[in-house]
Image: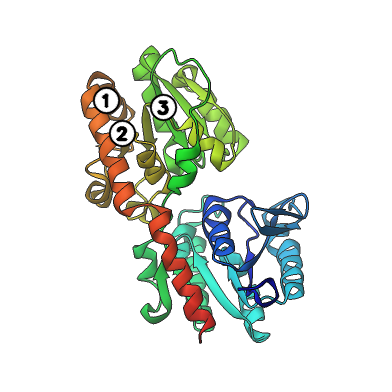
Amino acid sequence: MSNKNKIKVCILTSVHPPFDGRVFHKQAKTLVKAGYDVVLIAQHNKEEIVNGVKIIPLPKPRNRFERMTRVVWKLLRLALKEKADVYHFHDPELIPIGLVLRLFGKKVIYDVHEDVPMQILNKDWIKSYTVRKSVSLLFKVFESLSCVFFAKIVAATPDIAKKFPAQKTITIRNFPILELIDKAHPINTHKEKPIIIYAGGLSKIRGIKEIIQAMDFVREKAELWLLGNWESEEFKRECESLKGWRYTKYLGLKPLEEVYSYMKVDIGISILYPVKNYVTSLPVKAFEYMACSLPMIMSNFPYWKEIFGECALFANPDAPKEIAEKIFYLLDNPDKAKKLGNNGRRLVEKKYSWEAEQRRLLDIYERVLNK
């Protein structure tokens, strides 16, 4: 399509960083390559064009309340200014914005990354479980009613998709971008021992404490690398006080392309707690480890055993000693570790890559625009 006739897409997020894997690297860049004019409104420090995506900055909020009020309404004003053909939003707190955009006659896509009503039940900052349950139910009703007005619902997993109307919902999974991973070179560092890596949110519910505790059993035989943001300074201090911390290296939050350079190591690990949202999830980090040919150690969820059985060992997420035993097994059996890693890479090449999944994104846009 010519520049003059380009269809304009405005992607909205008040929560995710501008260069988020799903929002920017997968969806926005894919739409640009397909010929769309793409604008992304997200928290950022300046207006710029990156890989053909125009980024319009939102201010960084001081707290959650400010993000959900002042920042969200600024996002609405900026979105309306763009006069886009399609608006694609990524955060549940933007549902009211999606509804306002519908009132203005816009085509709106809601991208659902999590089962939010279930997620609310696990929000520790809401102290009372009774309050959590009530908020969860209210949100579930609000979300269901709101979705009637949206053109399409995009779900990150099949399990999430089941909760929305089948006729307007499509699953677009968070598979890794093979091209990006294959371009990444291993970081230039001398490895004195095998490296275990975890890349992602560093929170209690993601089993970070148990992984570090497992390192106290592993000791000098390997080193744990952590990449990502801590959920709080308090949780970070708690982890730093553990005996296994002396065998752990925290490397901070890295850009996606750089993360893949760090992943060219020995073992990938994903030990999530058995909460409802996780037991049927498809963790993007697992597919990224697979794309990097890493053998994995994962929580022993039945669904994960079914999906990742050819490329991982499984452990009880509550048992650091059991996690350590799986690490020892991979260290002591390099041929088995290599086979698991090769199996993972083969599966990604065959059916778990963004290169295969992106067609679903383009199909949904064609359907929305042809209505």
Q: Earlier in the sequence, mark 3 or mark 2?
A: 3
Task: Name which residue type carries label 3.
Answer: Val
Q: Residue at x 40, y 71 (%)?
A: 170
Q: Residue at x 70, y 59 (%)?
A: 54
Tell me where residue 314 appears, x and y as whole percent: 26, 38
Tell me where residue 298 appears, x and y as whole percent: 32, 39
Q: Earlier in the sequence, mark 1 or mark 2?
A: 2
Task: Name which residue type carries label 1.
Answer: Leu
Let me know if residue 240 appears in the view.
Answer: yes
161 or 25: nearer the viewer: 25
Q: Could you tell me if the residues under marks 1 and 2 are in contact, i.e. CB atoms within 8 Å?
A: yes
State how far apart marks 1 and 3 are (Cα). Answer: 13 Å
Q: Could you tell me if the residues under marks 3 and 2 are in contact, i.e. CB atoms within 8 Å?
A: no
* Image quadrant where one finds the N terminus: bottom right
Q: Is residue 97 left or right of residue 318?
A: right
Q: Is residue 323 above or below residue 367?
A: above
* Element class at badge 3: loop
The residue to which callout 1 is attached is: 330
Q: Residue at x 53, y 50 (%)?
A: 21
The residue to which callout 3 is attached is: 265
